[in-house]
Image: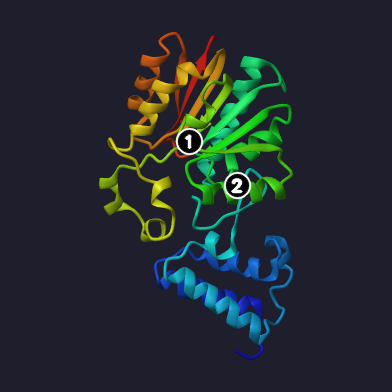
Amino acid sequence: MKHKTIFEALNWASSFLVEKGRDENAARLLMQHLYQTNYSGLMMRMHDEINYEQWERFQASVMEHASGRPVQYITGTEEFYGRTFQVDESVLIPRPETEELILGTLERMRNLFGHQAELRLADIGTGSGAIAITMKKEWPTAEVVATDISGAALETAKINAGNLEADIEFRLGDLTEPLRNEKWDVILSNPPYIAFDEAKDMSEVVLEHEPHSALFAEEDGLILYRKLAEQLPNLVKQRALIAVEIGYTQGEAVADFFKTSFPQAKIEIVKDINQKNRIVFCEIGV
């Protein structure tokens, strides 16, 4: 397309994506990726002409997203807690709600252990490494171990740890198995929690591209919380913090699992920014 500006290309892409039932903001993210720039950098170039090769590449990426592939898998990146993480189809795309897990955990760690205490922290089912790496960066004195049942996910997480200069030990294995015979101060997990019968209500963008092993779980999505609650009493110290991200309908059920395993603990169900139940915190020894 001759003499098309970035502004005109974006207008075309936004309209096209809306027509296809996609988010028009994806156009800007794809253009930023094409020019390897941020929002303000792109704004300053709005009237630059887009050359033929760039137009072809931009058009192809817009078509790819219109067909259902998430923008983050096209660009290969997602922002999380102010840092850029590499993502691919081996891992879930980090969600903004998980940043609230980080914030709540850091606040409770300060209250429980004191500022920047030397702690042992495990992230079970690390995926891209977003939780483990962020916790290491925000609490540098922590010894952080990240586990996953997927070797491919751990490879992606290792790349992110290297890129973000986070010293983390990665272990392959199912749930708490890689952590056994050790004691931990903090255990975090964002496990698969979607019930299989919820798939019919989900976006095909998620269903067709994100790894199902990281999305779905048996027992109406609750099996991994039940197993965690059963297994963690042997793995935590006398004073400890456990935090898990949950589906918004699962708060009471997950809290009950932890009340059974830790009857003396302080257990909270915390809502996210959208006022949906999103995190269960279990503080032990308070």
Q: Residues within 10 Å of mark 2 (few under 14, many from 20)?
A: many
Q: Residue at x 51, y 24 (%)?
A: 180
First in residue order: circle 2 vs circle 1: 2
Q: Residue at x 67, y 37 (%)?
A: 168
Residue 238, by quadrant, is top right
Quarter of the image that includes the C terminus: top right
Residue 21, by quadrant, is bottom left
Q: Is residue 163 left or right of residue 57?
A: right
**How is the structure coloured here?**
rainbow
Q: Is residue 243 above or below residue 146?
A: above
Considering depth in this image, is 246 or 171 the residue closer to the camera?
Answer: 171
Farthest-out residue, front? 181
Give the number of the disc on residue 127.
none
**Cα distance in 3D space between marks 2 and 1:** 25 Å
Check disc 2 and report its element: helix, strand or loop. Answer: helix
Q: Residue at x 46, y 12 (%)?
A: 265
- Where is residue 251 shown, x and y percent of the image? 37, 28
Check disc 1 and report its element: helix, strand or loop. Answer: loop
Q: Is residue 247 left or right of residue 148?
A: left
